[in-house]
Amino acid sequence: MIKTFLLLQRINEWLAVLAGGLLLLSVLVTLYDVVARQIGHSMGGTDELSGYAMAIATSWGMSYTLTSLSHVRIDLLRTRCQSMGRSMLDVIAMLALAGTAVVVAYRVWPVLAKSIENSSTANTTLETPLWIPQSLWMAGWLWFAVSAVFMLVMVLKLFLSQRFDQIQQHAGIRDDT
């Protein structure tokens, strides 16, 4: 299970690089548009494209944040607990996160389905077919849900076998000290 986690971690690192590349491309397109406006030419639609890039990069980047232990956690109570108590709070946190990810991933489909059904396009000059950015956005949410459920199963197995140190290492709070 830990080997699979390490593979998941590597995959999410690559996905984070791709998401970062998408954001960098968005910045370059916006920069080009700003400079081009100064000489009387504008591409138009850069705000729309950067919005899509942000939504897509965010949905895909959440899995990286999960496997790199970078999600925000309120650890006031956790730091006062012993190993088993910390692990129990980590299990609860992972359960809440996985549950939320699954619900959101499930609720994204109706948004995409309605866009496909209605052949919806953006009400901008680009008239982007909305199924394109929404599909990429939904895929990111689905991947996040899969990653979170895998992490939950891993944490539950580690907890039941009382390997609390491994829970801290793979699903606890990152120790940057």
Image (cartoon, grey):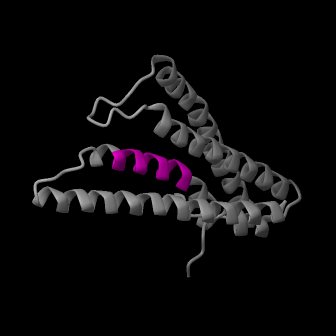
Above or below — where is 117 with respect to 175? above
Rendered view: 95 above or below 113? below
Give the number of callouts.
0
Q: Where is residue 157 drawn, in percent x and y?
A: 84, 53
Q: In the picture, residue 122 is in which quadrant? A: top left
Q: Is residue 105 magenta?
A: no
Residue 150 image point, x, y percent: 75, 50
Figure check: 133 above or below 168: above
| Residue drawn at the location 23% of the way across and 56% of the way down | 33
- Quadrant location, the C terminus: bottom right
- On screen, residue 106 above or below 139: above
Of residue 96 and residue 5, the one placed in the foreground of this image is: 5
**Residue at (76, 63) in percent of width and height:** 7
54 or 42, nearer to the observer: 42
Residue at image point 85% right, 59% down: 1
Question: Taking 176 as reference, is 41 left or right?
Answer: left
Q: Residue at x 35, y 46 (%)?
A: 49
User: What is the x, y in percent for residue 102?
Assistant: 64, 37
Where residue 169 sits, quadrant-wise, is bottom right
Prevalent SS, magenta region = helix
Q: Is residue 54 visible?
A: yes
Taking the image as shown, residue 134 lies to the left or right of residue 45, namely right
68 or 25, which lies in front?
A: 25
Residue at the farthest top position:
118
Could you tell me if residue 82 is visible in this image?
A: no
Percent coordinates x, y for residue 123 in the rendering:
29, 29
Left or right, 34 with respect to 56, comes to left
Stretch in magenta: 49-61
